[in-house]
Image: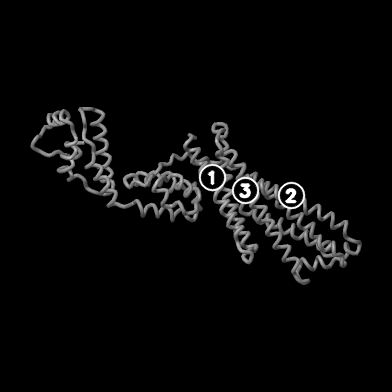
Amino acid sequence: MDKSEFERKVSIQSDFQNDMQKIFQNLKKERSEKRTNDLYSSYDSRIEKLYSEYLTNDEKLRQYQEEFSSSDYWNARTQTKELNKEIKEYIKLKIDELKKTRITDAKSKSSISEIAHNSNNNIELSKMIRRQFIRIDSLKSLIDKLDNEVDKEMLHLRENQLNKIMEKINDLNEEIILEASEQDLINCDYFNKNVFNEIQDKYEFAQQRIKNNLRTLKSQDKIALPELKIPMFNGEYTKWMEFQDLFVKIIHENKKLSCTEKIRYLKTSLIGEAAKQIQHIEAVGENYDISWQLLRKRYENKRIIISQHSKNIFGLPKMQENSVLDLKRLHNDLKQNLWAIRAMQVKIESWNAFIIPIFVSKFDIETLKQYEHTLQHKNELETIEEFL
């Protein structure tokens, strides 16, 4: 991986971090009446998706840590991980607060309240059982997320989270047992319904699922994507077709890339005026097609492209001296613009009547003499193919 490609990938990682920060800021601004479990789950899913892709890219970049050890990225990645941890803890804290409020206000017929109230009027035991159910709910929620987790580092992260929550459940269970009287042990539904044993079984099953998933991922042959040499586009209409052809082949039609990766590659391939066209569009997967179509609508303008190439031909600089390099440059510029016009499905074969005289007018005196001397049929007009 060369330096420019490494910096491009680092730029994508920076976008991930910025998007996570924006989401976190928006979450904090949400009005209190909108703060529900569904809202927090929605934000949590968005953060998970971004951070999962961040970790996937990070795994690729870490292969080049020695080669690019001086890069600021290695410090930035630590900040991103801390940011993810901060957001997760914030969401968990807010969800716990909601659950505590709901449990506190619940009526006696709610299942959790029934168990807590059925503790022989032991107020302290009742509070402890309520706290236990909050932790159990957190563990169950985390277990549910394992269904969609296919990233190795995220699985390890989930494993650590499960262990920490289960450790707290174990500690509180011991306190509940010590607090309970003999009558509580007989009558309290927390013990009668084997609440602790049930969640312990779920935890052990989840741990086994994680181990199986990690084993599967390890056994799979990972096909590394080739280094993507993506062209840059600055908004020049005459450069659009070349950029579009290369980008479509390398990125757009690459089925190994997600739409989120595609839009980030697209954004990092644009500079100048072109970058401004989609700078306010968030770099998320669902916005890729919108961004691509916006650029096509803007720059895939046949009239402007042909007009610009024609201006380039008329504006070719005149040779100042009999120089092979100047003649070669002049020839290449003419050919490049003509072929670009022909690529727009324009028939240029009949243009020889004015293209050739324009081009010849750019010769210096000595080159013009040599050209006239090489003509076999001085009274006939050459075709463009013959002339070039």
Mark closer to the chain start, 3 or 2: 3
User: Which residue occupies 57% across, 46% down?
Assistant: 54
Up/down of 173 relative to 79, above or below = below
- The residue where tag 1 is placed is 14
Give the percent coordinates (x, y) of residue 326. Answer: 25, 31
Label 3 sits on a secondary structure element that is helix
Closer to us: 197 or 170: 170
Give the percent coordinates (x, y) of residue 234. Answer: 38, 45
Q: Residues within 10 Å of mark 3 (few under 14, many from 20)?
A: some
Assess whether mark 2 and mark 1 are in contact (beta carbons under 8 angstroms). no
Q: Which mark is residue 164?
A: 2
Residue 349 seen in the figure: yes
Give the percent coordinates (x, y) of residue 328. Answer: 25, 31
In the image, taking residue 299 as reference, residue 106 lies left or right, namely: right
- The residue where tag 3 is placed is 83
Up/down of 94 relative to 214, above or below = below
Give the percent coordinates (x, y) of residue 285. Answer: 50, 53
